[in-house]
Amino acid sequence: MSEDKGFYNRPLNESISELMAKFRGQKKAEAPISQDVQAPVDAPLQLATRGSRLEAKFVDGLISAVVSIVVGAIIGFEKLTTPALCTEDDWMIVALACLALVGANAYFFSRSGQTIGKMFSGIRVVRIDGSRCELARWIFLRGGVMALVGAIPVVGGVAYLIGILLIFRDERKCLHDWIAQTIVVNV
């Protein structure tokens, strides 16, 4: 008979897993969502659906929007649209909010290959051989290359759109997946 440790005495990743399962009306997950991927998986990997990837992106975007609204409420919404009005303190608040958001996702990704949105959707990023996707690969290849390309006027927007549309191929991989040699799979 297992003893219930109470919600607040459980590891953070287990608590999030249980909350998400309850939100979706599922029974308690057999294993925590953030179970580390250490080596290639013996069982065949099941690619995440396009819908679950979109859901994860939407949740991550919603979290970013909430952070932006909080920052706007603190420093004033007009300053978000007119950066010249921002003081050094305002920029510090913006920087700290960005670092907190990136830091939270980096923390979860380094542990499980999942952003908060991917945890919610029950998917994770792995290398094409099923091994763990390193944090540096996620930051620099999956995100960094696309951010650099996206900064190029006109070309960046077209490349970003093409990168997203690639998900409709049989492999279900976006351009950043091809660049980083990763796939997104069900947990």
Image (spheres, rainbow, N blue to C red):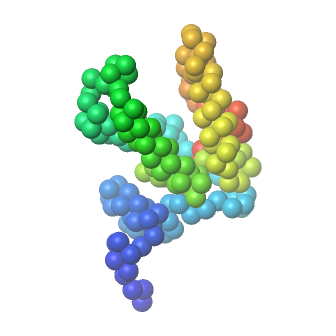
Residue at the image point whose x is 34% and y is 77% from the top: 6
For the point 50% across and 48% down, which residue is it? 103
The answer to whether residue 47 is seen in the rendering is no
Residue 62 lies in quadrant: top left
Q: In this view, does 95 lie to the left or right of 77?
A: right
Number of numbered discs overlaid on the protein picture: 0
Image coordinates of residue 74 in percent, x first then y, are 27, 38
Residue 124 place in picture, x, y as percent:
56, 50
User: At 27% from the left edge and 27% from the top edge, which residue is drawn?
Assistant: 77
Please say whether residue 37 is visible from this viewpoint: yes
Res 172 → quadrant: top right
**Residue 180's spot in the image, x, y percent?**
70, 37
Q: Residue at x 58, y 58 (%)?
A: 111
Q: Where is residue 88 in the image (x, y as percent from the top left)?
A: 39, 32
Please name whichever residue, 173 or 67, is drawn nearer the observer in this view of the structure: 67
Q: In this view, does 131 lie to the left or right of 85?
A: right
Of 154 and 1, nearer the camera is: 154
Q: Residue furthest bottom?
A: 1
Query: 69 or 36, which is in the foreground?
Result: 69
Vertical placement of residue 96 versus 25, above or below: above
Residue 38 lies in quadrant: bottom right
Q: Is residue 112 above or below residue 136?
A: below
Q: Residue lying farthest front?
A: 88
Compared across the picture, whether 156 is left or right of 10 comes to right
Please state, as top left, top right, bottom left or bottom right, where the C terminus lies in the image: bottom right
Q: Residue furthest top?
A: 154
In the rendered image, which quarter contains the N terminus?
Answer: bottom left
